[in-house]
Amino acid sequence: MRKESDFVLRVDLFSVDKLILLSLFLLASLPFSQVFFVRVGSMTLDSFELIYILIGFMLVLKILAGGKVRKTMFPFLSFVIAVFAYFFISTGHYSVFPHDFFAQLRLNYFQFAIATVILITPVKLKNRTYLDVLCIAGLISAFLNLTIYLFMPNVLEKMLSYSPELIKLVTTRGFWPNSTLTFFAIFSVFLPWNRKGALSIFRYISLIITSVALFFTFNRTMQLGAILFFVGCLLLEKRRKASPRSSLRILTGVLIIACVISAIALATPLAREQLNKRYPLSKSNIQEIYKVSVVNQRLNLYAQYLSSIKQHFPVGQGLGKPFSIRQDGLGVFVTDISFMEFLLPFGVLGLVIFFSFIAALFKLVLRYKTETNTLEGRLVILLLFLTLLVSLNYEIYVRGNFVIFITMLIVTLRNDQQEVKGT
């Protein structure tokens, strides 16, 4: 009787893993967050948030049914303690309304919270399956993004409940929240098992389409990070003495990407306009970009961040208050710097939360690399390092879906490592 019960439990847990994978596929395949939404009273939950809730529910179910959690508990526990403690600090000491506290908590830390739960959940997904799912989803998401941006720009205006200023921004530049999937497409084509078969060709197609979509976001930080990761992967593969045919296929893919981007850019007036605005194509462009992006925006923001840190050190300013004030007087409740998203509201404890999470990721990957000595481990270390650099100018580890995707990638590596040990 017990054996039959155990079998049913294993089947149920296996089904939960599949549902988690399906939810991640849906999260990655959507071109933007407000494809669909649900109204709950006065609150509106967009499609990303609904998927976060679904993933969180299944992770908790997995923990309860599995009867155990992983040892990487510290990031999760420290974050939960900080949320409870700073609710009383923010609403009491800083006189913040509870609604404002939870609104900023929901806006900035939903994805990070899910990632900390993934770290402790006994999810049993296979690494190759997970990467292929991300490649498929990335291809779908990138294709939809390009189609809407190039041929149906009015769709965004009708579907996104953003301010007129933000609507103008996302319709003049390719609005693709899942642009970080380009990193996973690059990662997948360099893996040793990506050498032959239909799936290999599909991964290259996914890399081309996601790279073109990333180009049209005109996000210079993300683009530079993707280029550096691609070059780093080439160098690591060269050290592994890969076959010339493999490198030739990769370089051919790069040439195709460049040709596609050039052709579309030359044919699209909107793209040509953004090229002139966003990239230093002439001396006057360099001066304008420096004036607008660095002097008027970045330096002003950094000065406000430094002032808040000094004023509220070491506790932080709490949640529910703006991190900075724009020139028109409106408060901004987010920041593009990932670690600053923790330092400003939570002070020193915020740095402990953020860097303990990063340390947990590195610890798992380094253990995998040491015990397996594979190219995959080196590539993930490179991916973590470069995306940390990207996070200094883009919220890649906080408000984006990347923090969920990279955490699950490392958890699947851990699963493969444990399977090798068990054989």
Image: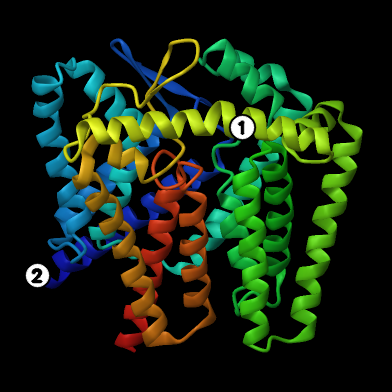
Report if residue 264 is visible in the image: yes
Observer-nearest of 275 and 1? 275
Report crowding for label 2: few under 14, some 14 to 19, many 20 or more residues within 10 A (C-alpha). few
Which image quadrant is residue 185 in?
bottom right
- What residue is drawn where x is 78% and y is 34%? 285
Report crowding for label 1: few under 14, some 14 to 19, many 20 or more residues within 10 A (C-alpha). few
Report if residue 53 is visible in the image: no
* Disc 2 to disc 1, C-alpha distance: 65 Å
The picture places residue 4, in percent across and down from the top left corner, at 16, 68
- What residue is drawn where x is 83% and y is 41%? 281
- N-terminal of the two: label 2 or label 1? 2
Q: Amino acid at mark 2?
A: Arg
Which image quadrant is residue 196 in?
bottom right
- What residue is drawn where x is 67% and y is 22%? 171
* The N terminus - image quarter: bottom left
User: Is the C-beta separation of discs 2 and 1 under 8 Å?
Assistant: no
Secondary structure at badge 2 equals: helix
Observer-nearest of 55 and 269? 269
User: Which residue is denoted by mark 1 in the rendering?
Assistant: 293
User: Which residue is denoted by mark 2 in the rendering?
Assistant: 2
The picture places residue 236, in percent across and down from the top left corner, at 61, 78
Depth-wise, is mark 2 or mark 1 nearer the camera?
1
Mark carried by residue 221: none
Q: Is residue 74 placed above or below 152 in the rendered structure?
A: below
Observer-nearest of 285 and 267? 285
Instruction: Report whether 21 appears left or right of 73.
Output: right
